[in-house]
Image (cartoon, helix red, strand yellow):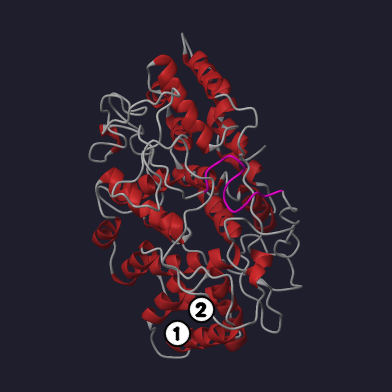
Amino acid sequence: MAYPYQSSGFPGYPGYPGNDPSYPPAGQQAFPGGQYPPGGAYPPAAGGGYPAAGGFPAPGGYPGAMPAYPGAPGFGAPGQAPGYGAPPGAPGYGAPQCAPGYGGPGFGAPGGYGAPAAGGYGAPAAGGFGAPPGGAPSYGGYQQPGAQNYGGGGPAPVPGGFPSGPAPGQQPLPFAAAMTATQGTIKASSNFDALADAEKLRKAMKGFGTDEQAIIDVVSNRSNDQRQKIKAAFKTAYGKDLIKDLKSELSGHVEELIIALFMPPTYYDAWSLYNAMKGAGTKEGVLIEILCSRTNSEVRNIVACYKSEFGRDIEKDVRSDTSGHFERLLVSMCQGNRDESQNVNVQQAEQDAQRLYQAGEGKLGTDESSFNLVLASRSFPQLKAVADAYARISKRDLISAIGREFSGHIEDGLKAILQCAINRPAYFAERLYKAMKGAGTKDSTLIRVVVTRSEIDLVQIKQAFVQMYQKSLASMIAGDTSGDYRKMLLAITGQ
């Protein structure tokens, strides 16, 4: 379906099909800056205990400066982080941004993303993005031998250790100490001119050779919303598709990285999930990373985008590509119905901790359904309280208990949920570290994490990386990559 140009010169973003009033109507110039109302969330949990400020971040972001896990600098000051997920002028992360124009038949989806119909918004004549070179790696386990427990007054995490629940005898930290105000390394350019940027990119690709540095300078210093406007301005000014031109001038990992940056965030998540399940084999790590770490509104937007752009039902694809308890966990994640209340019910946390103990360490065998129920439905602040209570009951942390009771992909999925509840930046720091450690680099994982977190919490991920591994993210990227690919990654990470 083609979207006609408006009198202002740029085509409007299309609305979602189905006349759903919660989505923007067709012809709207830009999506709102915040999240869509999640809808369908569970009612706030009753009870006292933890302060409301320690809860899951609302679209407005956390107020004030909050400390990181022990030994790390504070994550921000009042007014520094504009909210959870987006700098001023950029759309909220997870807002539906399936603007057309991202590939034709080469994308592997029926009709492509914004199939090349007449007048389409930036649709290439042929080709499309194609699958990432080499695909994405399989998901690895998260248990770190010797990892330091995450508790008040305790020592800093040992190298490779993931901050976990409090050690026996320690006071549990409030959730706010682990989930602080977030900040991306990429922010919207203040003096933005889409047409001027389109001219810079055209000049960088015109004639013999390519000025890769000019492309890096533009792309790495614009928000995703601004990149969409550059793409539209390029088509308007030159009658050519920017993505197709970039693909003809670039190659390898730097091409994959830059093309990923031009995908709207929701579409990039949906596209990553689609490519993780299409063809022979399944990249379970991609499914876990995306479905187990996103908010309700993000998950729902991904599910809708997956359906509209690839013509498939994500839940059906998950069921056909996975099995057993892992399948059930991912199906639970696809619903986007986790409780997102900021309140913590201490009594319920004690009951859930006891329930998990009796379902695992306290009996012969494992009641997997109890773990699925608690970890798939409780809010992240509530799960943090459950982990604290579990440590007091069993004298062991819950992440280690999951490692003893489960194995394989279900273990990885349950741990990922709990780690995001305890300290989301540390979870992604570990994903980055494992993508680069040892021989070879899992480039698709490296690219995906850096791109998807660049406007959300990459500043905090960098801080967590130093705390956990005693080296900077930039130094590890510099040692594992080269050329323009290295330059682009370092530019995105703010080096």
- Residue 401 bears which disc, if any? 2
The magenta stretch spans residue 81:
yes
Residue type at numbered disc 2 = Ala
| Residue 297, percent from left and from top | 45, 57
The residue depicted at 50 percent of the width and 53 percent of the height is 35
Picture layout, residue 486 above or below residue 401: above
Q: Quadrant of residue 335?
A: bottom left
Query: What x and y, as percent, mark residue 302?
Result: 38, 52
Quarter holding the C terminus?
top right
**Numbered disc 1: secondary structure:** loop
Neighbourhood count class around disc 2 (C-alpha, 10 Å): few under 14, some 14–19, many 20 upward: some
- Residue segment shown in magenta: 80-92
Which is nearer the eye, 185 or 30?
Answer: 30
In the picture, the quarter occupied by the N terminus is top left
Drawn side of residue 424 relative to residue 321, left or right: right
- In what element is the residue under mark 2? helix
Q: Mark 1 is on which residue type?
A: Gly
* Principal secondary structure, stretch drawn in magenta: loop
Q: CA distance from mark 1 to mark 2?
A: 8 Å
Q: In the image, residue 96 lies at what x, y percent?
A: 42, 47
**Which residue occupies 48% across, 71% down?**
339
Query: Could one spot residue 290 in this view of the protein?
Result: no
Q: Residues within 10 Å of mark 1 (few under 14, many from 20)?
A: many
Looking at the picture, how far across and down is residue 73, in whole percent?
A: 76, 56
Q: Residue at x 34, y 46 (%)?
A: 16
The tally of labels here is 2
Disc assigned to residue 360? 1
Q: Is residue 70 left or right of residue 483?
A: right
**Does the CB distance between marks 1 and 2 fall below 8 Å?**
yes
